[in-house]
């Protein structure tokens, strides 16, 4: 299982929020590039970056911070937030992003996602952000009328490299993973699933790995890492 330490960008800083609410933002590092280096030094092999401002505004806002991260580390980076067009995708892949995450357009323009996955095989991920059973869009500011499985199944056999499922109701709360929900989606689609939202301890990683059914391919680590409720060493050992 691959672990993805998260760097959420707001106003050029590395922050964590609760339930995606910008008003709850806590700044953990003024230098996203330094934070990225710290995760590399801790032994992680991927980094998960989200432009929070960009996700709400529909275009890149923290591009400078993303470029600084890309210049600071040599491990793969996956990036989401405000990426809405093929030109946006091409820009970031050419800039060095290994995997581009598409969320809002996966709901509103699934054909664009399929076209992108065809143009950049395995370098496109679909983000399915779930609140009260429905998929949220536009930086979690709006709810759609679609459930997670409906969105996920749109991209079967499209060449999408990963499905990142975020439990918004638990995101940033340290309540623990809802392993059953992640497992139901993983069992229903052939796209590798990365779980996000609520991870609190090593036990969450252990439970993800121990569940019967299709293997969960990865997990995003956020507040638990920043708050120190889980150590990088313990997390990586549990995932190995």
Image (cartoon, grey):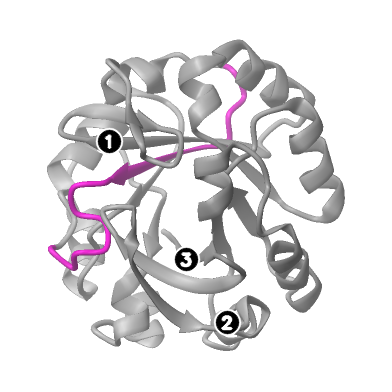
x, y (%) of residue 42? 52, 86
Q: Quadrant of residue 193?
A: top left
Determine if residue 240 is in view. no
The answer to whether 83 appears left or right of 181 in the picture is right
Does residue 17 appear in the picture of this structure? yes
Report whether 216 appears left or right of 3. left
In the rendered image, the vertical position of residue 211 relative to residue 85, given as above or below: below
Badge 3 marks a residue whose secondary structure is strand
Residue 51: x %, y % from top left: 57, 54
Cα–Cα gap, marks 2 and 1: 27 Å
Among numbered discs 3 and 2, the one appearing first in the sequence: 3
Q: Exactly how many numbered labels are in the figure?
A: 3
Judge whether residue 165 is colored magenta. Answer: yes
Which one is nearer the viewer's eye here, 46 or 143?
143
Which residue in the protein does label 1 denote?
130
Which residue is under mark 2? 35
When the figure is inspected, residue 174 is found, relative to residue 217, above or below; the finding is below
Distance from disc 3 to disc 2, alpha carbons, whole Å, reads: 10 Å
Q: Find the distance from the CA under tag 1 to the CA under tag 3.
A: 18 Å
Is label 3 in contact with label 2 (beta carbons under 8 Å)? no
Mark closest to the chain's N terminus, 2 or 1 = 2
The residue indicated by pointer 3 is 6
**Helix, strand or loop at mark 1:** strand
Q: Residue furthest right?
A: 94
Image quarter where the C terminus lies is: bottom left
Dominant SS type (magenta): loop
Q: Quadrant of the N terminus?
A: bottom left
State the residue in front, 190 or 103: 103
Q: Which residues are magenta?
A: 158-175
Quadrant of the image occupied by residue 175:
bottom left
Using the image, determine if residue 153 lies above or below residue 40. above
Q: Residue at x 18, y 29 (%)?
A: 133
């Amino acid at each position: 299982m691959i672990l993805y330490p998260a760097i959420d960008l707001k106003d050029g800083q590395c922050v964590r929020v609760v339930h995606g609410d910008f008003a709850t933002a806590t700044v953990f590092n003024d230098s996203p590039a330094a934070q990225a280096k710290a995760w590399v030094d801790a032994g992680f092999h991927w980094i998960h970056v989200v432009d929070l401002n960009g996700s709400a505004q529909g275009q890149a806002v923290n591009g400078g911070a993303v470029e600084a991260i890309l210049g600071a580390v040599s491990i793969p980076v996956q990036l989401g937030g405000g990426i809405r067009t093929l030109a946006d995708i091409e820009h970031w892949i050419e800039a060095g992003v290994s995997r581009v995450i598409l969320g809002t357009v996966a709901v509103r323009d699934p054909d664009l996602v399929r076209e992108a996955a065809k143009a950049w095989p395995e370098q496109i991920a679909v983000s399915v952000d779930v609140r009260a059973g429905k998929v949220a869009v536009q930086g979690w500011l709006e709810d759609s009328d679609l459930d997670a499985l409906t969105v996920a199944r749109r991209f079967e056999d499209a060449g999408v490299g990963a499905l990142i499922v975020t439990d918004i109701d638990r995101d940033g709360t340290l309540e623990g993973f809802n392993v059953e929900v992640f497992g139901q989606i993983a069992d229903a689609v052939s796209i590798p699933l990365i779980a996000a939202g609520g991870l609190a301890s090593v036990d969450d990683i252990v439970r993800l790995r121990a569940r019967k059914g299709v293997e969960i391919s990865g997990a995003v680590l956020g507040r638990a890492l920043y708050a120190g409720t889980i150590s990088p060493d313990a997390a990586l050992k549990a995932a190995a």
